[in-house]
Amino acid sequence: MEINSRTNASNPVQIADDGKTVAIVSYLSIIGWIIAYVMYGSNKTQLGAYHLRQTIALFVVGIVTWMVQMFLIFIPVIGWIIGILLIFVYLLLFILWLFGFIAAINGQEKPMPIIGKKAQEWFKGIK
């Protein structure tokens, strides 16, 4: 049996985490992202970093959309119409989340449509 550097001396079982756990947990919520980031600190993998960048971009876009909607709700009629249309943005964000989550489950570095490639640029500090 081959033992790598991530093996505990008292338990010589090889730990085979290629970053999939970090990738999957990062999609579960903002709290899940924080937990995944902490986990990533002790097991830095390319797959983990990739999905941490994808999910933080998704969360930022969602929060900005929500903030715009909250601002527009105070503008009579036009603000309400635009606010209602932003519901479709939330649906799109859910679809993007689903694409990313499926890629994480499969252990793939597949960018989410629309924001995936930009997420890698915006958050390149997560290495």
Image (tube, rainbow, N blue to C red):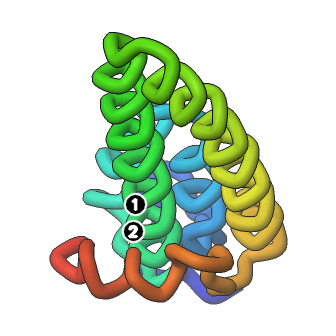
Disc number placed over residue 53 in the picture, else none: 2
Q: Residue at x 33, y 11 (%)?
A: 74
Q: Is residue 14 visible?
A: no
Q: Which residue is mark 1?
A: 57
Type of amino acid at the residue the image marks with label 1: Ala
Type of amino acid at the residue the image marks with label 2: Arg
Residue 28, x across and y down, in percent: 61, 37
Q: Residues within 10 Å of mark 2 (few under 14, many from 20)?
A: many
Q: Residue at x 34, y 17 (%)?
A: 75
The residue lying toward the viewer, choosing from 5 and 108, is 108
- State the count of labels: 2
Residue 6, x across and y down, in percent: 43, 70
Q: Residue at x 74, y 43 (%)?
A: 91
Figure quadrant of residue 105: bottom right
Q: Is residue 54 visible?
A: yes
Q: Residue at x 53, y 35 (%)?
A: 82
Mark closer to the observer (1, 2):
1
The residue lying toward the viewer, choosing from 6 and 68, is 68
Q: CA distance from mark 1 to mark 2?
A: 6 Å
Disc 1 + disc 2, Cβ < 8 Å: yes
The residue lying toward the viewer, choosing from 10 and 67, is 67
Q: Is residue 9 above or below residue 109?
A: above
Figure quadrant of residue 8: bottom left
Where the N terminus falls, by quadrant? bottom right
Q: Is residue 72 above or below residue 112?
A: above
Residue 120, x across and y down, in percent: 37, 83
Figure quadrant of residue 56: bottom left
Q: Residues within 10 Å of mark 1 (few under 14, many from 20)?
A: some
Label 1 SS: helix
